[in-house]
Image: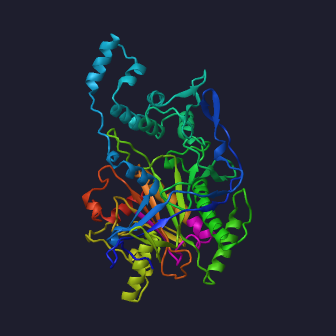
């Protein structure tokens, strides 16, 4: 069992170290090689994003895992590459103050310098303060505004028809780099849904536009209207293989209303597929196919075979899943990025190690700790609850949801917390929400992770996740973090259910001192929010 604190009786801090080396099976069926731009009149393409063979990652970033002194505060992960760079020059740590500016003086100077009182928008945009440009980039719904901003942020290759075909590149220390002169503006305008798709494509969506991460999986709907790439992030703050399922550049999705059932099925399929394939490789189970996606029957075969092996008591090195989704983007004129790094709809997933070696003040010991997974916090409390009550935490939780009564005893008011339910899972508003508008999804049966979920249950979960996101979007939520609390894959105890939490970030409650103390402040009763969610169904 993992010691839940970095404090030891010896008076020495304890921590663990990830030193990732791992294989990544190439399950991609198709290539999408294309030009990204030009460097010194030579074409720069994205061939490196489409490796022909499977990948073995070596020399990935080392990551320190440090339990908090107080277990309820979780665990800290330190990327050694980032930290080492700061260690060499700690005086460089800090935020640059924003440049001072005056909108009135800027425009007055421009008018004086040009001797012109007519509106020349291209010239005016060039002299506007950066904060004003960022504000326009986040709020404008005018494609002409956004094209002007895009061209201020980087150099484009534009045809006679005015449509960009790529970016201009310069030779850098590690190969060609796009000529981006204003990175914050570039990122912000690229995330605005109203920017023409041709600009989105060459700026961020085309494979290779954001770097050399290999595409090791893909998914196409039967009608080819839904296309998803699976990227491998070799060096990540999540060690041992961090994958992202991104909507491809020929299936652009910036809004939840644009997200189809097929899109959700595809993104979740890549999560299930990568998890089952990694487990099969560790257990020596032959894969049904290579260099192409597995179908539903292949997934069920792998899932059932893996489960049968684990039920013999076999332990696995990577025995926990990590899944998450940051939807939405915003960037304040004061240069605070407020949510995800990119609004193009995507989901992220990885696997976590069962144990890690323990270090004490720089020295490796012969001890091991359980690697941190958020689902373990649920497991530990479920064990404690059964010990103290003799009953199942989740059975009682479901009964509480079904038996719910309002706290304010208001007559003829909504009492149900349930938003959507089928025979496999329940989507509901938790009685104690941990963000404004939080929604939770939970399996009804004793299914604690995706390995225990059969095809029917996985379909139910996928559909409910899409319902939750659509409800929150229709209520006006622009930024939503979604996370999974799962049971360890080789834990055969049936006393833990799989839970997903959907956590919107609202304009008036981004988090402050109350939330830092785990004090969650609400302005509504959960039953009334559940009613508001149900009103968005249909």
From the top left corner, tell me how far across and down residue 126 is, in percent.
39, 23
Q: Is residue 458 located in the magenta-colored stretch of the structure? A: yes
From the top left corner, tell me how far across and down residue 391 is, in percent.
42, 87
In terms of depth relative to the viewer, which is nearer, 365 or 341?
365
Which region of the structure is painted magenta? Answer: 439-460
Is there any visible trace of residue 114 in the rendered image?
yes
Looking at the image, which residue is at 34% across and 64% down?
434
Q: Is residue 49 located in the magenta-colored stretch of the structure? A: no
Looking at the image, which residue is at 32% across and 53% down?
510
Looking at the image, which residue is at 41% across and 67% down?
362
Relative vertical location of residue 205 with respect to residue 464 in this rendering, above or below: above
Is there any visible trace of residue 399 in the rendered image?
no
From the top left corner, tell me how far across and down residue 40 is, in percent.
60, 27
Lateral position of residue 246 relative to residue 127, left or right: right
Relative vertical location of residue 163 with respect to residue 346 in this rendering, above or below: above
From the top left corner, tell me how far across and down residue 292 is, in percent.
72, 56
Lateral position of residue 37 relative to residue 535, left or right: right
**Farthest residue toward the bottom?**
390
Q: Quadrant of the N terminus?
A: bottom left
Residue 374: name its quadrant: bottom left
Residue 505: name its quadrant: bottom left
In terms of depth relative to the viewer, which is nearer, 153 or 413?
153
In terms of depth relative to the viewer, which is nearer, 5 or 526?
5
Lateral position of residue 107 relative to residue 349, left or right: left
């Amino acid at each position: 069992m993992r010691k839940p604190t970095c404090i030891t009786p010896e008076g020495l801090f304890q921590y663990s170290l990830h030193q990732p080396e791992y294989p990544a099976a190439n399950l991609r069926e198709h290539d999408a090689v294309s030009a990204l731009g030009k460097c010194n009149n030579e074409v720069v393409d994205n061939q490196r994003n489409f490796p022909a063979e499977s990948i073995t990652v070596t020399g990935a970033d080392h990551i320190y895992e440090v339990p908090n002194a107080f277990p309820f505060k979780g665990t800290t992960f330190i990327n050694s590459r980032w930290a080492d760079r700061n260690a060499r020059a700690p005086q460089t740590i800090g935020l640059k103050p924003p440049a001072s500016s005056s909108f009135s003086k800027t425009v007055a100077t421009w008018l004086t310098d040009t001797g012109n009182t007519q509106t020349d928008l291209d010239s005016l945009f060039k002299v506007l303060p950066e904060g004003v440009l960022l504000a326009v980039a986040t709020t404008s719904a005018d494609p002409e505004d956004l094209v002007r901003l895009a061209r201020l942020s980087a150099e484009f290759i534009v045809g006679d028809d005015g449509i960009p075909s790529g970016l201009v590149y310069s030779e850098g220390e590690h190969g060609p780099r796009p000529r981006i002169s204003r990175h914050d503006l570039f990122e912000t305008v690229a995330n605005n849904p109203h920017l023409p798709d041709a600009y989105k494509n060459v700026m961020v969506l085309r494979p290779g536009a954001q770097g050399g991460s290999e595409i090791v999986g893909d998914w196409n709907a039967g009608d080819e209207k839904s296309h998803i790439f699976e990227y491998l992030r070799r060096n990540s703050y999540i060690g041992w293989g961090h994958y992202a399922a991104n909507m491809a550049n020929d299936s652009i999705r910036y809004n939840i209303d644009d997200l189809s059932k097929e899109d959700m099925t595809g993104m979740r399929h890549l999560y299930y597929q990568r998890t089952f394939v990694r487990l099969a490789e560790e257990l020596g189970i032959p894969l049904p196919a290579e260099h192409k996606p597995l179908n539903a029957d292949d997934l069920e075969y792998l899932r059932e075979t893996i489960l049968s092996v684990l039920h013999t008591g076999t332990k696995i090195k990577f025995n926990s899943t990590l899944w998450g989704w940051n939807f939405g983007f915003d960037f304040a004129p004061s240069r605070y990025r407020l949510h995800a790094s990119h609004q193009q709809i995507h989901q992220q997933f990885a696997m976590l190690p069962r144990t890690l070696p323990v270090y004490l003040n720089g020295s490796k010991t012969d001890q091991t700790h359980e690697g941190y997974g958020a689902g373990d916090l649920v497991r530990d409390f479920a064990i404690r609850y059964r010990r103290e009550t003799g009953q199942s935490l989740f059975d009682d939780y479901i009964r509480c949801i079904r038996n719910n009564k309002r706290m304010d005893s208001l007559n003829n008011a909504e009492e149900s917390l349930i938003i959507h339910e089928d025979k496999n899972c329940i989507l509901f508003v938790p009685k104690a929400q941990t963000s404004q508008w939080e929604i939770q999804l939970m399996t009804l049966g004793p299914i604690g992770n995706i390995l225990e979920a059969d095809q029917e249950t996985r379909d139910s979960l996928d559909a409910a996740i899409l319902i939750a996101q659509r409800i929150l979007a229709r209520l006006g939520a622009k930024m939503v973090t979604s996370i999974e609390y799962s049971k360890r894959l080789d834990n055969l105890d049936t006393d833990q259910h799989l839970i997903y939490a959907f956590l919107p970030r609202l304009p008036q409650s981004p988090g402050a001192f109350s939330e830092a103390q785990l004090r969650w402040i609400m302005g509504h009763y959960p039953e009334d929010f559940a009613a508001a969610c149900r009103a968005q169904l249909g």
